[in-house]
Amino acid sequence: MMTEAGLVQHLSPFERNHPLLPEYQLTEKGRFMKEAALVISSSEHQMSRGFLAAKAWNWPVLIALHFHYNEFNAIRQLLQTATPRILSTRLGELHAEDLVNKTLITDSTPKYKYELSTHIEPILNITNHNLSALL
């Protein structure tokens, strides 16, 4: 699967030069993904909330909030393949973990506004900078 995704390349016995050497080697894309994963892992360690990347859509939602997509429909339009149910679930979980603040706005149509917690913003600023530096 990782070979088909272009993350690793299979090495023939001739290319390995010894049977105890690895059969696979990271491609350029694989090295990029490794560096991105290290940035995210470091950020998760600073947040002290466990392995957030274990659940799909946690990081895309946090990044969307970092870029001030503060309403549910704005996040939904940005993350087009995420279903409303999964977005609602992730926002609720992130709120329960105190990573996201949720405020009810009672205008003509009541809605919730989501924002990053103040202690998470600096971490996501650094994460965004480090991920952008990879590009």
Image: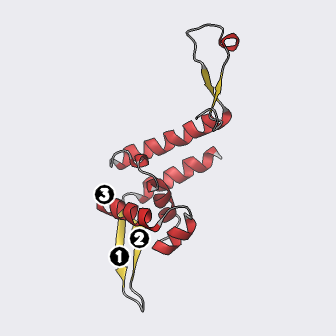
Please, what secondary structure does the residue beneath circle 3 have? Answer: loop
The quarter in which the N terminus is drawn is top right
Residue 121 vs residue 36, the one in the foreground:
36
Please, what secondary structure does the residue beneath circle 2 have? Answer: strand
- Residue type at tag 3: Glu
Q: Quadrant of residue 134?
A: top right
The residue at the point 66 percent across, 31 percent down is 27
Decide: is 111 above or below 125.
Answer: below
Residue with the mark numbered 1: 103
* Spatial CA span between label 2 and label 3: 14 Å
Q: Position of residue 31 (x, y in %)?
A: 61, 34
Residues at discs 2 and 3 in contact (Cβ within 8 Å): no
Lower sequence index among marks 2 and 1: 1
* Spatial CA span between label 2 and label 1: 6 Å
Could you tell me if residue 117 is visible in this image?
no
Decide: is 123 above or below 31.
Answer: below
Lower sequence index among marks 1 and 3: 3
- Residue type at tag 1: Thr
Could you tell me if residue 79 is visible in this image?
yes
